Image (cartoon, rainbow, N blue to C red):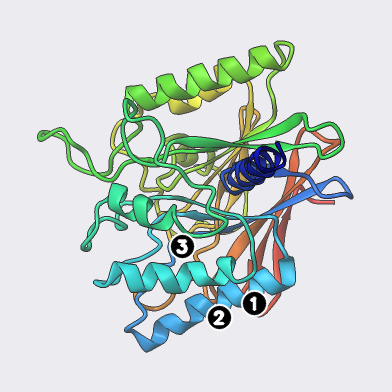
């Protein structure tokens, strides 16, 4: 009997450890805050000396801001040796025991690994919250994370992560890709299910992906609509497949966060949804004309259905606080 009890206890301990290791939920901190650091377009190539500023920026920002989640919004690694480069980038978050998530950009799978191979590799690293997502949904990296209230374990905020594709797959159409209808359906079904579970009230949600929606261009056609810098034309997908409309109809997404266009870091409101760029987090191995690299910080409050955000530059300066106080 005693031996059976010991075995049961061991199994229970192992089960609890497995559940904790594979838990993909996040929690607001005791003061009711949840801070996200968005790094985008690192284009990391460790063989290039000028790329060291990528790691320096990560280390400095993570130590100063102490986020509860780090999100890499695509074009993270462009080195020929993808494994070594991913190891070096992710060491910055793993060593600090910070949960982290990834969505892919159009350049991540242009080296020696496919998107799926990258996800299979990085998902084994500690504190990874990323997932490949459903196999019947186009792309790799369509998933959600829930941010819960620690006091009652109820979900307060949803974080959507989506693969914005790379390039057009239609021979007669050139340019960047767009969300597949299967992704829009996945989003709509997921949102509807979460809303139903929340007494038919949409949960405030943020969405992270790489290539901006077409609506970014409409928003920024008037400079008075945006806060931050626009120094290049928005390179959205060639076709607009309707993801923004789906978000408006669902009523949950309050902000989208992208990268892709290195010389843009603005944010603005378009029909109630904040459309934001991150701050380019890379180096001179690719184009960038805004001066210092950096990141975007997003802060959620468990008691408020919105967020605050600002750009943090390498060196520590904080600019473009939104909304303005």
Q: Do callouts 2 and 1 mark residues in contact (Cβ within 8 Å)?
A: yes
Mark linked to residue 100: none
Above or below, 260 relative to 303: below
Can residue 67 be seen? yes
Marks 1 and 3, the one that precedes in the sequence: 1
Separation of residues labelled 2 and 1 (CA atoms): 6 Å
112 left or right of 38? left
177 left or right of 121? left
Residue beneath label 2, please? 56
Tell me the crowding category of disc 2: few under 14, some 14 to 19, or many 20 or more residues within 10 angstroms, Cα based.
some
Examine the image and state in which quarter residue 144 appears: top right
Residue at x 34%, y 84% (from the top left corner): 48
Separation of residues labelled 3 and 2 (CA atoms): 20 Å
Q: Secondary structure at mark 2?
A: helix
Separation of residues labelled 1 and 3 (CA atoms): 22 Å
Residue beneath label 1, please? 60
């Amino acid at each position: 009997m005693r031996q059976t009890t010991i075995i049961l206890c061991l199994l229970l301990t192992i089960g609890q450890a497995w559940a904790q290791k594979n838990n993909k939920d996040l929690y607001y901190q005791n003061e009711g805050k949840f801070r996200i650091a968005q790094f985008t377009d690192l284009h990391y190539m460790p063989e290039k000396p000028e790329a060291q500023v990528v790691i320096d920026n990560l280390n400095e920002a993570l130590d100063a801001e102490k986020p509860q989640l780090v999100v890499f919004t695509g074009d993270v690694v462009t080195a020929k040796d993808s494994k070594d480069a991913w190891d070096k980038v992710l060491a910055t978050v793993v060593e600090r025991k910070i949960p982290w998530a990834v969505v892919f950009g159009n350049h991540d799978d242009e080296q020696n690994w496919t998107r799926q191979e990258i996800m299979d590799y990085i998902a084994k690293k500690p504190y990874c919250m990323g997932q490949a997502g459903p196999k019947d949904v186009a792309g790799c990296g369509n998933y959600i994370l829930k941010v819960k209230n620690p006091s009652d374990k109820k979900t307060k905020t949803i974080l959507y992560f989506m693969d914005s594709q790379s390039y057009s797959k239609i021979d007669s159409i050139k340019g960047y890709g767009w969300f597949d209808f299967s992704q829009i359906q996945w989003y709509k079904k997921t949102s509807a299910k979460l809303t139903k579970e929340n007494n038919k009230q949409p949960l405030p949600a943020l969405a992270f992906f790489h290539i901006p929606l077409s609506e970014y261009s409409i928003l920024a056609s008037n400079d008075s609509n945006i806060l931050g810098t626009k120094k290049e034309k928005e390179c959205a997908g060639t076709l607009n497949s309707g993801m923004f409309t789906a978000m408006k109809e669902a009523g949950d997404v309050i902000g989208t966060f992208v990268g892709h266009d290195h010389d843009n870091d603005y944010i603005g409101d378009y029909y109630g949804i904040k459309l934001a760029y991150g701050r380019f987090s890379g180096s001179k191995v690719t184009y960038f004309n805004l001066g210092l690299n950096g990141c975007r910080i997003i802060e959620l409050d468990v008691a408020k259905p919105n967020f605050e955000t600002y750009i943090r530059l390498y060196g520590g300066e904080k600019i473009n606080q939104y909304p303005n106080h």
